[in-house]
Image (cartoon, helix red, strand yellow):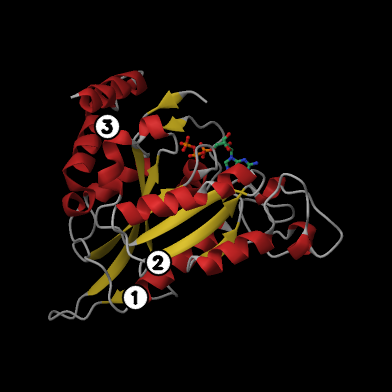
Amino acid sequence: MESSLEFSNSFTSVSSPSARCRIFKIIVIGDSGVGKTCLTYRFCAGEFLDRTEATIGVDFRERLVEVEGEKIKEDREDGGERTQELQLWDTAGQERFRKSMVQQYYRNVHAVLFIYDVTRPDSFRGLPAWIEECRRYSLGQELTRFLVGNKSDLRDTCSCDPRSIKVEGQVTRDQAQKFAVAHGMILFETSAKSLPGGGGGGGGEPGGGHQDSVEDVFMALASRLKRQTRPPPRFSTTQECLGPIGVLYRDIFFQTASQEEPSERLLDMHLLREAG
Ligand SMILES: Nc1nc2c(ncn2[C@@H]2O[C@H](COP(=O)(O)OP(=O)(O)OP(=O)(O)O)[C@@H](O)[C@H]2O)c(=O)[nH]1
């Protein structure tokens, strides 16, 4: 995969969220190539991103959601009504592209999505290292954590009970479920691309087993965040949510967005800052 620093177009609306919009910062982490970019893009843009490049630093995407058909009522003096915005930090899986941003990833997080590729057991075995990184940056166990097995469209189907599929080189649902329980996570299996019989990213049931749509995963997260009894700090401005580095990245993006090939310029700036 080639490299580029990309900021989703959907990010533009973050700069002017409604004054009454509750912003939740969600970090999406996992090994390189598991599909973090494709999953966040699917949720925010509604389609599969065919050609991706390795993420450098972070890509921001966001989507405004209404949970359970109703806008969120805030317990505020003015009795105002608020909507909820999921701000997704699609982080770089490759170590060399993470260094300068890592501290920003873990600042003021509301929820973490741990992603692995169901067809790549190495990405599943890599999960403890991501959990350890969260611990190092003081993310508590009380945070909402989802475990998401991606690329289930590639999973071999089996006529036997799909919960106990034993296909060499694939992560079974049972394995993942045990891991999720042991680490206080909720498990989802999905595909950013498509699921047999399920169309774009949702609803199919390969081998008869239950698969979740990408929409379901993120809406379950939104619903969970809405219900948090003691939520971590909320943000009312984009600046607060992104922090200074995030704002800097955003500004660089807007400065270079009109250039023909911004990727190299962005990479240069990223590496320069890393060196500095
Ligand atoms: N078949 C299939 N391919 C997928 C799916 N999701 C992602 N891919 C492919 O997997 C590759 C990597 O996807 P990315 O979304 O760039 O992976 P990433 O985790 O963001 O990678 P880094 O940015 O390096 O951390 C790309 O070739 C995608 O087309 C999926 O659900 N099904």
Pointer 1 local density, CA inside 10 Å: few below 14, some 14–19, many at least 20: few
Residue 125: x, y in percent? 57, 48
Query: What secondary structure is found at the residue carrying circle 2?
Result: strand
Pointer 3 local density, CA inside 10 Å: few below 14, some 14–19, many at least 20: many
In the picture of the structure, the residue carrying the numbered disc 3 is: 253
Which residue is painted at 51% across and 43% down in the image?
38
Question: On the image, which quarter does residue 272 sit in?
Answer: top left
Q: Left of 50 or right of it: where is 59?
A: left
Select label 3 or label 1 by which is in front. 1
Q: How far apart in space, not on screen, are marks 3 and 1 (Cα)?
A: 33 Å
Of mark 1 and mark 2, the one earlier in the sequence is: 2
Indicate whether 49 appears above or below 64.
above
Residue 92: x, y in percent? 41, 38
Give me the disc on residue 186: none
Q: Is the CB of mark 2 within 8 Å of ligand 1?
A: no
Which residue is painted at 21% across and 26% down in the image?
273
Q: How far apart in space, not on screen, are marks 3 and 2 (Cα)?
A: 30 Å
Residue 117: x, y in percent? 60, 46
Q: Residue type at mark 2: give it.
A: Thr
* Contact (Cβ within 8 Å) of mark 1 with mark 2: yes
In the picture of the structure, the residue carrying the numbered disc 1 is: 228
